[in-house]
Image (cartoon, rainbow, N blue to C red):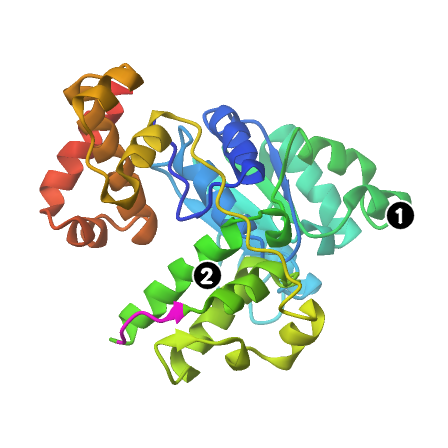
C-alpha cells in the first residue's frame, strides 16, 4: 500500500525513519504517543496515521487538551446528560462517542488534569465511557493517539502525569524531529511554502538569493515548520523584488546566524533511497537518457518510464498537499486520469 503522508513534506533521513515506523504501525490498532517540539507537525503525522489505518473510512476526531478549560474538558471528551450542570439543556455526545469506529487524537495530553487522566486510563483498559451526569456506561471502539511537546517521563517523576497512563499510551512512540535536525528539508519546505503563497496571491514566485538560503538553513527555527510557514507567507507579501536578499530577513534571524560570509553552504536534500531517485538523477539538468543509461541501470523502457511517472505523481501530490484536483492541474491531466494512474500504482506495488 502507498503511504499517505497527509502533506508532510521532506526527504531527510530522520523524517524517512518516522515514515518507516508509520508504515508499520498504521495498519494496527496499537496506541501511539507522538512527541516533538511545538510546530513540528504532530497533528499532520497523526492524520497520516489515521489515513493509512483500517479505520480511515471512519471519523478522525481531534481535541486539544490544553486549549479547553479543565472543568469543561471532561464534558467535551465524554459528553453529558441533560441537567448534568448549569446550561446543560440537552444531552450531548462527547468526542469519544463521535470517534466511535475511528481515531481520537488527544493533542497536548501532558496538559490534562490528573483526575481526567484516570478516566482516559479507563477508556484504554475497558473500552467504555460514562457521560457527565450519566448513570450507565457506553462501549466505544476507538483508536487512541496522543501527542505532547512535554517530556512525559519527567512529568511522571514530578507527579504531574500518571505513570500507568504513560505506559498505556506509550505502546508505540513516534518522535517528530525538530526542523533544525532535518538538514536540507528546511529549504525544500521554504520553497514549497513560497510557491504556495505566491500562487495564492497571484504573484510571480519569489526566489531566495544564495546568501538568503544560507541564512535560512543556518537559523535554528525554534517554532519549527509552523514558524517557517508563517515566515514564508510574510515574505511573499512584504518582499519588494523577485529575488529575496538577506536584507529582507528580520534582525532576529540575522543576529542569530552571525557573519553570513562564514556560513556553510546549505545541505542538499537527502537523496531518495529508491530507483525513483536514480531515475531522477539521470534526468537532472535535462540530460536525456540513452539506451546505455537504461542498460547501466538494468531497466527496460517501461520500468524507466513507470519510475519517472511515479516520481512526478508523488511530487505533484506533495505540492498540492494531497488534493487530487490540484495535483491533476499541476500535471496537466484530468482528475480521472490521475486517479487511474494512482490505482495502477497501488496495484503494482
- Residue 210 relative to residue 199: left or right: right
The residue nearer to you, when weighing 339 against 303, is 303
Which circle marks residue 190 in the picture?
2
The residue beneath circle 1 is: 159
The quarter in which the C terminus is drawn is: top left
First in residue order: circle 2 vs circle 1 = 1
Residue displayed at 66% across by 77% down? 252
Residue drawn at x 78%, y 45% is 152
> Judging from the image, what secondary structure is the residue with disc 1 in?
loop
In the rendered image, is residue 80 in sight? no
Q: Is residue 275 magenta?
A: no
Q: Residue shown at 82%/41% (left/top)?
A: 153
Name the image quarter holding residue 53.
top left
Magenta segment's dominant SS is loop
Report the magenta residues as a range: 203-207
- Left/right placement of residue 349 relative to residue 115 reads left
Question: Residue 99: where, in percent of width, then height?
Answer: 46, 43
Q: Position of residue 100 (x, y in %)?
A: 45, 39
Q: Residues within 10 Å of mark 2 (few under 14, many from 20)?
A: many
Report how far apart the C-alphas of labels 2 and 1 lie in the structure: 40 Å
Number of other residues with Cα within 10 Å of mark 1, as a class: few under 14, some 14 to 19, many 20 or more: few
**Closer to the camera in the image, 274 or 149:** 274
Name the quarter where the N terminus is drawn: top left
Amino acid at each position: 500500500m502507498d503511504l499517505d503522508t497527509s502533506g508532510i513534506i521532506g526527504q531527510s533521513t530522520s523524517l524517512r525513519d518516522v515514515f518507516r515506523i508509520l508504515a508499520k504501525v498504521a495498519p494496527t490498532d496499537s496506541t501511539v504517543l507522538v512527541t516533538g517540539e511545538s510546530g513540528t507537525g504532530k497533528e499532520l503525522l497523526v492524520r497520516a496515521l489515521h489515513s493509512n489505518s483500517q479505520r480511515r473510512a471512519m471519523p478522525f476526531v481531534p481535541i486539544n487538551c490544553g486549549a479547553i478549560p479543565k472543568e469543561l474538558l471532561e464534558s467535551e471528551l465524554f459528553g453529558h446528560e441533560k441537567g448534568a450542570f448549569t446550561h446543560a439543556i440537552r444531552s450531548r455526545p462527547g468526542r469519544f462517542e463521535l470517534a466511535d469506529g475511528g481515531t481520537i487524537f488527544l493533542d497536548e495530553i501532558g496538559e490534562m488534569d490528573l483526575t481526567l487522566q484516570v478516566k482516559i486510563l479507563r477508556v484504554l483498559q475497558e473500552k467504555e465511557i460514562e457521560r457527565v451526569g450519566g448513570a450507565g456506561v457506553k462501549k466505544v471502539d476507538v483508536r487512541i493517539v496522543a501527542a505532547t511537546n512535554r517530556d512525559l517521563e519527567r512529568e511522571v517523576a514530578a507527579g504531574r502525569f500518571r505513570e500507568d497512563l504513560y505506559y498505556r499510551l506509550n505502546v508505540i512512540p513516534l518522535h517528530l524531529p525538530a526542523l533544525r535536525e532535518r538538514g536540507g528539508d528546511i529549504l525544500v519546505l521554504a520553497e514549497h511554502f513560497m510557491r504556495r503563497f505566491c500562487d495564492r496571491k497571484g504573484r510571480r514566485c519569489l526566489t531566495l538569493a544564495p546568501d538568503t538560503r544560507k541564512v535560512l538553513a543556518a537559523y535554528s527555527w525554534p517554532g519549527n515548520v509552523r514558524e517557517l510557514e508563517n515566515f514564508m507567507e510574510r515574505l511573499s507579501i512584504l518582499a519588494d523584488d523577485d529575488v529575496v536578499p538577506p536584507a529582507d530577513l528580520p534582525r532576529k534571524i540575522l543576529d542569530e546566524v552571525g557573519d553570513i560570509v562564514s556560513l556553510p553552504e546549505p545541505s542538499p536534500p537527502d537523496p531518495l533511497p529508491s530507483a525513483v531517485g536514480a531515475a531522477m538523477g539521470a534526468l537532472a539538468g535535462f540530460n536525456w537518457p540513452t539506451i546505455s543509461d537504461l542498460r547501466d541501470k538494468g531497466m527496460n523502457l517501461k520500468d524507466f518510464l513507470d519510475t519517472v511517472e511515479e516520481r512526478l505523481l508523488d511530487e505533484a501530490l506533495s505540492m498540492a498537499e494531497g488534493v487530487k484536483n490540484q495535483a491533476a492541474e499541476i500535471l496537466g491531466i484530468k482528475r480521472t486520469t490521475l486517479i487511474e494512474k494512482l490505482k495502477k500504482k497501488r496495484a503494482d506495488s
